[in-house]
Amino acid sequence: MSNVKSTPILEAYHLKKEYEIPTGQLAVLKNIHLEIYPGEMTFIVGRSGSGKSTLLHLLGGLDRPSAGKIFFEGEDISRMQENELARLRNLRIGFIFQFYHLLPELTLYENVLLPSMIAGRPDRKWATEVLKRVKLLSRQSHYPSELSGGEQQRAAIARALMNKPSLVLCDEPTGNLDEETAESIYELLNQLNRQEGQAFLIVTHDESWAWNYPRILRLHDGMLLRENRGEVQIEQINK
Ligand SMILES: Nc1ncnc2c1ncn2[C@@H]1O[C@H](COP(=O)(O)OP(=O)(O)O)[C@@H](O)[C@H]1O
Ligand SMILES: [Mg+2]
């Protein structure tokens, strides 16, 4: 988390997203600029319905922008074919969602191993290691339904780290958890961020956690604003 200007992992320029709705077009994202650097921990806060999930889906290649460009490690993902996007999502980006999205018919160990199997290079040793890092090794043969919400989210975090992505996108990662469990999840994310050097982009409507971190952006009226402890200004961009 330094100011050394290395190459950004992720760059988004002039990003727009409009949805077709019965009454016309809904402009959710109007003009988004964003750069994420290696190892950075960034929060995007904003009210429910402000477009946080929409933005995360565009940045992670799960959906396409109406206009604008997204570069992932210098590659223009708006030009990628579906199969290239699937590869990007599998190998280079980790995803963590509010409702964990673990596969119910697989054990924790199998859930965590799965991304490496999809990549065609199952790594059983590393699956065991990441389960250890999220303190779930003793539960590895359990099914998701046998775990608490916090444990399921830790398993989802282990799965997100399986293919050693350079960026982890988190959508309301503690939205379904009580305060104490939420705190333990943020502690884990901090620790992984320090250990593995991965960048984390966390979007949440719950601002209470974000204030512990230096970089907070606010999504408001389709634009990203930089928050400086109460002061708000448009995030400056040099391009
Ligand atoms: N597929 C869609 N079709 C039409 N409108 C959508 C679609 N997805 C999201 N929206 C609308 O876009 C806005 C932003 O949604 P979302 O990105 O989920 O916000 P947030 O995650 O900040 O709560 C909301 O008004 C929502 O109703
Ligand atoms: Mg959302």
Image (spheres, rainbow, N blue to C red):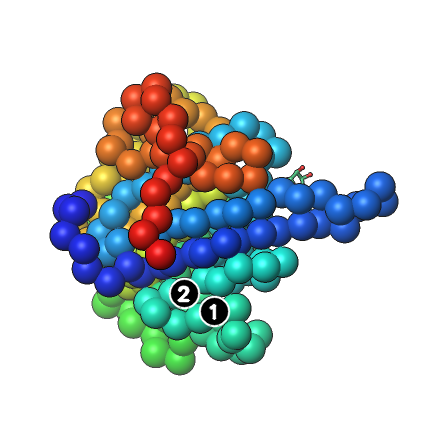
At horizontal 44% and vertical 71% (from top left) the residue drawn is 76
At horizontal 40% and vertical 36% (from top left) the residue drawn is 234
- Whichever of callouts 1 and 2 sits on the residue coming sooner in the sequence is 2
Residue 133 is left or right of residue 67, and the answer is left
**Mark sitting on residue 77:** 1
Residue 160 is left or right of residue 23, and the answer is left
Q: Residue lying furthest bottom in this view?
A: 120
Q: Residue lying furthest front in this view?
A: 239
Residue 213, image quadrant: top left
Q: Name which residue type carries label 2.
A: Phe
At horizontal 62% and vertical 43% (from top left) the residue drawn is 28
Mark 1 vs mark 2, CA separation in Å: 6 Å
Q: Name which residue type carries label 1.
A: Ile
Q: Is residue 227 visible?
A: yes
Identify the secondary structure beneath mark 1.
helix
Q: Taking the image as four quarters, which one is ligand 1 found in?
A: top right
Q: State the residue position of label 2.
A: 71
Q: Which image quadrant: the N terminus?
A: top left
Identify the secondary structure beneath mark 2.
strand
Q: Is residue 112 visible?
A: no
x, y (%) of residue 6?
19, 60
x, y (%) of residue 117?
41, 73
